[in-house]
Image (tube, coloured by chain):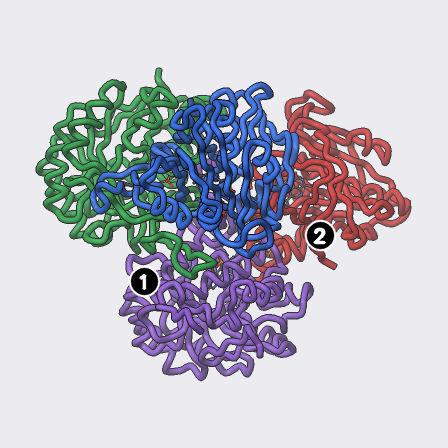
Chain colours: A blue, B red, C green, D purple
Amino acid sequence: MIKQQHMKLVKQEEIAQDIFELVLEGSLVDEMNEPGQFVNIKVAEGDTPLLRRPISICQIDREKKQFTMLYRAEGKGTTILSKRRVGENVDILGPLGNGFPVREAQVGDTALLVGGGIGVPPLYELSKRLVASGVKVIHVLGFQTKDVVFYEEKFNELGDTYIATVDGTHGTKGFVTTVIEEQGISFDVLYSCGPTPMLRALERNYGHKKVYISLEERMACGIGACFACVCHKQDDPNGHTYKKVCVDGPVFRAGEVVL
Amino acid sequence: MIKQQHMKLVKQEEIAQDIFELVLEGSLVDEMNEPGQFVNIKVAEGDTPLLRRPISICQIDREKKQFTMLYRAEGKGTTILSKRRVGENVDILGPLGNGFPVREAQVGDTALLVGGGIGVPPLYELSKRLVASGVKVIHVLGFQTKDVVFYEEKFNELGDTYIATVDGTHGTKGFVTTVIEEQGISFDVLYSCGPTPMLRALERNYGHKKVYISLEERMACGIGACFACVCHKQDDPNGHTYKKVCVDGPVFRAGEVVL
Amino acid sequence: MNRLAVELPGLSLKNPIIPASGCFGFGREFANLYDLSVLGSIMIKATTAEPRFGNPTPRVAETPGGMLNAIGLQNPGLEKVMAEELPWLEQFDLPIIANVAGSQTEDYVHVAREIAKAPNVHALELNISCPNVKTGGIAFGTVPEVAAELTRRVKEVSEVPVYVKLSPNVANIVEIAQAVEQAGADGLTMINTLLGMRIDLKTGKPILANGMGGLSGPAIKPVAIRMIHQVSQVVNIPIIGMGGIQSAEDVIEYFYAGASAVAVGTQNFVDPFVCPKIIEELPALLDKLGFDHISECHGRSWKEVCLTT
Amino acid sequence: MNRLAVELPGLSLKNPIIPASGCFGFGREFANLYDLSVLGSIMIKATTAEPRFGNPTPRVAETPGGMLNAIGLQNPGLEKVMAEELPWLEQFDLPIIANVAGSQTEDYVHVAREIAKAPNVHALELNISCPNVKTGGIAFGTVPEVAAELTRRVKEVSEVPVYVKLSPNVANIVEIAQAVEQAGADGLTMINTLLGMRIDLKTGKPILANGMGGLSGPAIKPVAIRMIHQVSQVVNIPIIGMGGIQSAEDVIEYFYAGASAVAVGTQNFVDPFVCPKIIEELPALLDKLGFDHISECHGRSWKEVCLTT
Ligand SMILES: Cc1cc2nc3c(=O)[nH]c(=O)nc-3n(C[C@H](O)[C@H](O)[C@H](O)COP(=O)(O)OP(=O)(O)OC[C@H]3O[C@@H](n4cnc5c(N)ncnc54)[C@H](O)[C@@H]3O)c2cc1C
Ligand SMILES: Cc1cc2nc3c(=O)[nH]c(=O)nc-3n(C[C@H](O)[C@H](O)[C@H](O)COP(=O)(O)OP(=O)(O)OC[C@H]3O[C@@H](n4cnc5c(N)ncnc54)[C@H](O)[C@@H]3O)c2cc1C
Ligand SMILES: Cc1cc2nc3c(=O)[nH]c(=O)nc-3n(C[C@H](O)[C@H](O)[C@H](O)COP(=O)(O)O)c2cc1C
Ligand SMILES: Cc1cc2nc3c(=O)[nH]c(=O)nc-3n(C[C@H](O)[C@H](O)[C@H](O)COP(=O)(O)O)c2cc1C
Ligand code: FES
Ligand code: FES
């Protein structure tokens, strides 16, 4: 169930350039179950910034009642968030949306997890769940440059992990698609989160297989009330039917909505 | 000279109901000299609240480069200020305005210091200065009720101190004027800060003597640029001449401006 | 005595707190969070004759103390609203205010006539002020004669009282208000959003795909308060006030200005529980201010109030 | 090359950052804080024929992300401004923009004729939009014909270029802009404040003694950006943009919208060093965005920009 809670900040650390790892604690974690869901954060009290910021759940520790987010301090809101300190309370609304369907990968299957930049975080909890249910995981993670790469080792512990950087400063030079082709990776299910051009390429190349993608869209409410985040459906691209990224997504099966 | 500085918060304590004592440290203190001046505080980064808040300087410690303010957490801005913590930096503009003329009281004179509510703070530094220059000080301080009385002992250390409370829960029941009359206090110079009705009463009763009063007015800039805080002069009550509370005051000689 | 109960044309409200149109959908999402029956009413999402997808995304952008939206009146259309949304809302103890939109007079008239027949629709809110539709929309709300004519036509067909929602994007709000009052409006709701724009620093292009959008949130509150203060003094129909309401204090400010009920929009996105919170906090605030009933606050900003009670 | 230099009618500006009228007095207070010669220009406080005390206090109130003011054009009058303020400003390397106000056409014409003769006044800013004077003022700025007529009359007598300051409190800003352009305006400055009000929770009365006041600050920025975006596409005279500017980023957003220079108002109260700070930060921001000169940013929100340079 969606709850609003002022959760305790127990860790805040810059793990790569402008990339922060934030751990929050509170009973709201009890409600978190699906990898790929997100929370909507009020980064500070008061009216600036006014709107909440959607950030994916990266890791869930139900025993400690803690969850982890990874975010890039970029605009006003995330920069303010990055200045919040241990011991403070952060206003969280969540968990929101529908996550990745873990069950679509069976015991013994190979799941390919493809992340781009700040789209990588939700894949971590997903990967853990897949591994726990006996699925073999392969990770292909794309970043702009070496300085913004994060969680490489953590993913490595769960399965083979390939890194691509646009400028070639780490791993393969190029895009995630370069890596998948070069390595000739085969898979039963593909899960992905990252920039839309990347998702489009994956849909184009592998859309005939089981591919699940997580979308981003500017949001206001995050709960389905404002109609900010709608997208057309592929079977009615110019009509009035629609999906809301916040409640029907953020994860969709490739081919379902217009990217 | 007026400076802007992010000063270090070294103490924040609730010393009476909703009354906070705040100590800030920084080289800006070097510029502070006159009791009765004030600073203009940005209580938090961002746009809410947008404007600075004017607060009087209550005590100056030039050696430690610290100064003290006392304020009532009442509206939005002061409530936010009251939540700032030791170690944080607070954006201060100051010192602003013209303070109390200490020299108007000579060695051996008696100065009567009359404060009302949250108008009491600037009288503390003033009293210390007067005592230091050999003036006898008498304090009459008025408050609503017992719970909001503050600094009674501190003033007591400097000179006779009478308290009046409106509801009679502490000291004399009534107003500061009640006390002055009942006690038959005589003085050479009167310095006062507090609500306008109180200042008006003092001006009416003692305006023939040397009386200095500190005014409050809603401000935007605090430096004389916006014309928010002007008042008419008593010698031209309906004309276009004026005084600005922020730069010409906040301390005026009684009779100078229209209250 | 219910200290918050308010009687308005067509609407017996147990309290004057109403989620604003377009900020609450048809209530389904919020029904998962709390019991909608605690509300005074709901202003449902603008309904047009045909289903509308609305504008391309991005449809929202943030501004200092506010937000822009260019949703473009996305809605499932009259038929579906009548067949699915309104019946679903009957489970709650709530009079519904149906927000009616269109691009031509005929659209408005058609939707108004039909939707007013729904048993739980107790009033219409005529949206003559949406800045996000290309044809009609905004023009209806900025020319007094046009606004009046539309009001008259809708009044002819509506079985329930008609509230007209005013646009703040005008030089003289009083003129428009008086025109629609004379045309038969039973009440006013104000204000809709101010027209605004934000531009992306990197691309140099407007953030909203639509270019301009409607500004809402706390930033516009002083404009709304001013307009309600002006209009409430010269009209004899009640005003439902809105624009940036976040707290019980804001509600009182709107009543002082001359509102008889209020709607909460953008803040539902920031805090989905804001409406029940305000309803809960109002009685204590009335105590603090010394009022027995919220209606005593009405119009104090301009009324000569007799101070001895 | 000076990457910030801007040429406007009558004004050779070393940079496009100008303190807005009424938010900087005649510069004296700020001259104590920094060297005014770093500025592009100064828009001095509105000058009227006779000295004015202005409105009773309180004259300012805070709003979410903004403030209201009802100063009421307090100023020492034309004679004193000519005799004391303008000569004092000559010590700085600054073309001055004189803000001209009045309650009747004759007042404007008189002040404009005289003040334009001061050697350091390089342009006039015709304040047809001040919401805080009872007679005239606001009406001049909301009726196209009236605004045009006033512009024409002032143009006849002014020795320097005339910029007309537009009010945002209108339904159709384009119409007004085009009317004053046709009447001979050399440039536009926009926007002045939005009309607003705040009410005191305890007293129930407006916080400002004057009742209503002008809303300024970040809250109004999206309205200003929208209006400049609309107007800059249809007029052939430059626009000096203003409304809520706080940072170099904001300046670029204004240029994208179609401004050719900007004025900073309210933020001078929040941070008296804001103008020099912005001037200092602009070159690095241009680097980051890939522009050689700030004028390259102009009108990108609507221009078809050729991407190959
Ligand atoms: C479902 C979902 C999950 C996300 N998960 C993550 C994550 O795990 N880690 C992470 O770093 N980022 C994530 N993002 C992106 C993140 O929401 C934006 O980076 C963030 O909102 C930017 O806010 P800002 O204050 O820094 O930028 P500003 O530019 O100040 O934001 C202004 C407004 O634009 C919106 N906005 C700006 N960029 C984006 C964007 N890319 N997507 C959506 N809204 C945007 C903001 O929410 C805000 O309303 C996610 C977005 C969505 C929709
Ligand atoms: C020269 C001067 C010295 C002052 N010294 C002190 C002091 O030492 N201790 C103290 O507690 N208070 C002092 N005050 C009053 C203090 O400035 C206000 O209590 C404070 O600004 C209220 O802010 P808020 O955010 O709590 O209230 P809000 O109601 O949120 O404030 C809204 C706006 O109104 C203004 N405002 C509200 N009340 C006042 C007021 N009484 N005077 C001036 N502006 C006001 C605020 O500055 C702000 O711009 C002083 C005021 C002045 C002018
Ligand atoms: C996302 C969004 C959608 C809106 N949709 C509608 C609508 O469909 N019909 C309407 O009359 N007003 C609509 N509005 C305007 C609101 O009902 C309200 O008048 C306005 O937002 C001011 O209130 P607020 O500041 O509390 O949001 C919408 C506002 C927002 C923010
Ligand atoms: C206190 C104050 C006084 C003002 N006085 C004038 C004035 O005398 N003449 C004028 O044309 N504009 C005046 N303005 C409007 C500003 O010049 C400016 O157009 C407006 O405030 C928007 O800019 P900002 O948001 O940066 O303040 C005044 C604004 C404020 C806040
Ligand atoms: S963000 Fe509001 S509907 Fe999706
Ligand atoms: S507060 Fe601005 S002039 Fe005094």
Quick check: which quadrant has ligand 6? bottom right
Q: Is residue A171 visible?
A: yes
At 21% across and 42% down in the image, what residue appears? Answer: A236
At 49% across and 37% down in the image, what residue appears? Answer: A55
Pointer 2 local density, CA inside 10 Å: few below 14, some 14–19, many at least 20: some
Specify the label residue B60 is tagged with. Answer: none
Pick the residue in front: A14 or C262.
Answer: A14
Q: Quadrant of the N terminus of chain A?
A: top left
Q: Position of residue D222 (x, y in %)?
A: 41, 54
At 87% across and 47% down in the image, what residue appears? Answer: B63
Report the residue marked by disc 2.
B5
Q: Are marks 1 and 2 in contact (CB under 8 Å)?
A: no
Pick the residue in front: D16 or D21.
Answer: D16
Q: Position of residue D106 (x, y in %)?
A: 38, 74
Which quarter of the picture shows residue D14?
A: bottom right
Specify the label residue D173 is tagged with. Answer: 1
Height in image: B50 above or below D31?
above
Height in image: A204 above or below D128?
above
Q: Is mark 1 within 8 Å of ligand 4?
A: no
Which quarter of the picture shows residue C297?
A: top left
Which amino acid type is shown beneath numbered disc 1?
Ile
Looking at the rendered structure, the secondary structure element under dot 2 is strand
Q: Position of residue C8 (x, y in %)?
A: 25, 29
Which quarter of the picture shows residue C49?
A: top left
Total numbered labels placed on residues in the image: 2
Side of A71 where C130 appears, left or right? left
